Image (cartoon, rainbow, N blue to C red):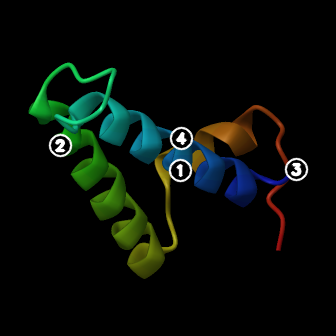
Amino acid sequence: MSSWQIVRIFAGLFILLSLTLGLPDSPWFINTWWLAVTAFVGVNLMQSGFTQWCLLESVLRKFGVKAGN
């Protein structure tokens, strides 16, 4: 698995987790401020699309995960 795939899996998991914890109709609702995590992940994905740089991808590459195409 390449670094860009892992980054997208992490982003998807964090979005689903924050929606689960932040939506009032969820059985695991904690607080609506969890929705800020969703916004942060979205902004980070948008920024990495423009700049071609993502911190998590850089960290994964330093740990030896291949870059991919």
Tell me if 23 is positioned left or right of 66 in this view.
left
**Disc 2 designates what residue?**
36
**Closer to the observer: label 3 or label 4?**
4
Tell me if 5 is positioned left or right of 47 in this view.
right
Write the residue at 40% across / 80% down: 50
Q: Quadrant of residue 14?
A: top left
Q: Quadrant of residue 36?
A: top left
Gap in Å between the C-alphas at discs 2 and 3? Answer: 29 Å
Q: N-terminal of the two: label 1 or label 3?
A: 3
Q: N-terminal of the two: label 2 or label 4?
A: 4
- 69 or 45: nearer the eye? 45
Q: Amino acid at mark 4?
A: Leu
Q: Amino acid at mark 1?
A: Gly
Measuring from the top left, give residue 42's x and y in whole percent.
33, 60
Task: Categorize mark 2 by other alpha carbons within 10 Å: few (<14), some (14-19), many (20+).
Answer: some
Tell me if 64 is positioned left or right of 27 in this view.
right
Residue contact between numbered discs 1 and 4, judged by CB atoms under 8 Å: yes
- 33 or 52: nearer the eye? 33
**Disc 3 designates what residue?**
1
Residue contact between numbered discs 1 and 3, judged by CB atoms under 8 Å: no
**Closer to the observer: label 2 or label 3?**
2
Gap in Å between the C-alphas at discs 1 and 4? Answer: 4 Å
Gap in Å between the C-alphas at discs 3 and 4? Answer: 16 Å
Q: What secondary structure is found at the residue carrying circle 1?
A: helix
Q: Is residue 8 above or below residue 58?
A: below
Residue contact between numbered discs 2 and 4, judged by CB atoms under 8 Å: no
Gap in Å between the C-alphas at discs 1 and 2? Answer: 15 Å
Q: Amino acid at mark 2?
A: Ala
Write the residue at 53% across / 41% down: 13
**Disc 4 designates what residue?**
13
The quarter of the image holding the C terminus is: bottom right
